[in-house]
Image (cartoon, rainbow, N blue to C red):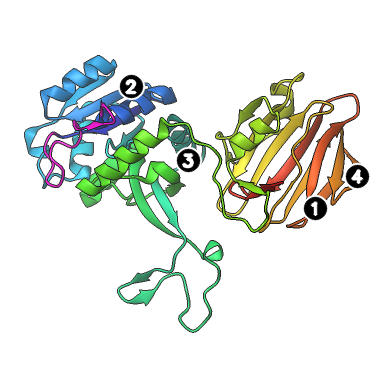
Amino acid sequence: MKIIGMIPARLGSSRVKNKNLRLLNGRPLVQYIIDAAKESNIFDSIYLNSEASIFEEIASESKIKFYKRPENLSTNQATNDDFAFDFLDNIECDILVQLLPTSPFVTASDIKNFVETLINQEYETLISVSNIKIEANFKGEPINFDRTKQTPPSQLLEPIQSYACSLMGWNTSRFRDNYQKYNAAYHGGDGSVGFFVLKGFALIDIDEEEDFLLAEAVAISKNLEHGSPQYYSDTTNAKSETDVPSILVKDGVEFNDLFDVNKEVVSIDKILNEMPKDKSWSKRVIDSESNSMTVICQMPGEGNRKHHHPDWNEWWYILEGEWEWEIENKTQIVKAGDIVFMEKNRKHKITAAGGNRAIRMAISRSDVAHVYE
């Protein structure tokens, strides 16, 4: 199976002049998606698709390929269907993945997971989308709520899905069939269509001047060192933290893998076998808008700092070893196979006990506040 990544980048732009060449924190906008695509290591070839020779120079410097599209497919009137079909008319592949340079914060992991989803789920078209949990109307009529009922908390609303557009993937045989039948293939036409949810900075798409200003601020901010968020509290000496990576580091966890998440099937045994045997580590497995699950391993005597969660209940499943569980100043030992529930506002501290490593599965949410004395 031949998988091709195609980055469309024409020179002209009606809303932001030469936006694909404009510098974003010192780098051309188009360079961000090129670097992410290369880092994903998922493509047999990556092409920069443009009518302008300056992009051929960028492709050469980046050690990717260049496809020169016809001038008539580089106007404001040219459609995605037309220039993608033209590309497929000249470049053979089984899977075509389009990566937009106007989404500079799509990561290599996003791209790799997108392509693996397209292939493993056997979709003929895969569309990147944003889950938006807010009441929405279409032509004056509600889509995901009932006007005659109280609205639920936003986190419980059925999300609407808007196109993120930054990543699109097609089985090329289905694309050609749809294009020849409907003169359109971008949205999937006939065949199986899937939706891949992008989150966070990956959803930033540059269309207007204001988008560039936002992206510039994000690009600069991502290079800065950020401390834990601080919150107003009526507890004199309490400090609230929500940044899980820094929390784990402060708790002495040496190795943390928190971003390779939400695989459809995961083997816990494989995680336990592959992760370090003689030092502390964490491996996040699930990270969704409703909950997260992280496997945490610590050596005897290691543990976290006493804290509580003001607005969230959590629970744990003990996978291996023993833990000393201090809850509201009362201590007990929990062992492999035990399930521990922690109601919000209860102060607790966890310490690995016994003579061997201890491993727990923590089920909570990635943005829950941890309040420390």
Q: CA distance from mark 2 to mark 4?
A: 58 Å
Estimate the x, y position of residue 331 in percent, counting from the top left.
91, 45
Between disc 2 and disc 3, the foreground one is 2
Quadrant of the rendered image containing residue 18: top left
Instruction: Tell me which residue sits at (80%, 53%) in the image.
Output: 341
User: Looking at this rendering, what residue extends furthest in the left direction?
Assistant: 72
Q: Which residue is mark 3?
A: 122
Q: Amino acid at mark 1?
A: Phe
Q: Is residue 210 covered in magenta? A: no
Estimate the x, y position of residue 55 in percent, counting from the top left.
17, 24
Main SS category, magenta section: loop
Q: Earlier in the sequence, mark 2 or mark 3?
A: 2
Side (left or right) of 30 relative to 332: left
The answer to whether 5 is drawn above or below residue 324 in the figure is above
Q: Earlier in the sequence, mark 1 or mark 3?
A: 3
Q: CA distance from mark 2 to mark 1?
A: 49 Å
Q: Amino acid at mark 3?
A: Glu
Q: Which residue is mark 4?
A: 331
SS at circle 2? strand
Q: Earlier in the sequence, mark 3 or mark 4?
A: 3
Q: Which residue is mark 2?
A: 45
Q: Is residue 24 covered in magenta? A: yes
The answer to whether the residue labelled 1 contacts the one labelled 3, judged by CB atoms less than 8 Å apart, is no
Instruction: Tell me the tag on residue 341.
Output: 1
Between disc 2 and disc 1, the foreground one is 1
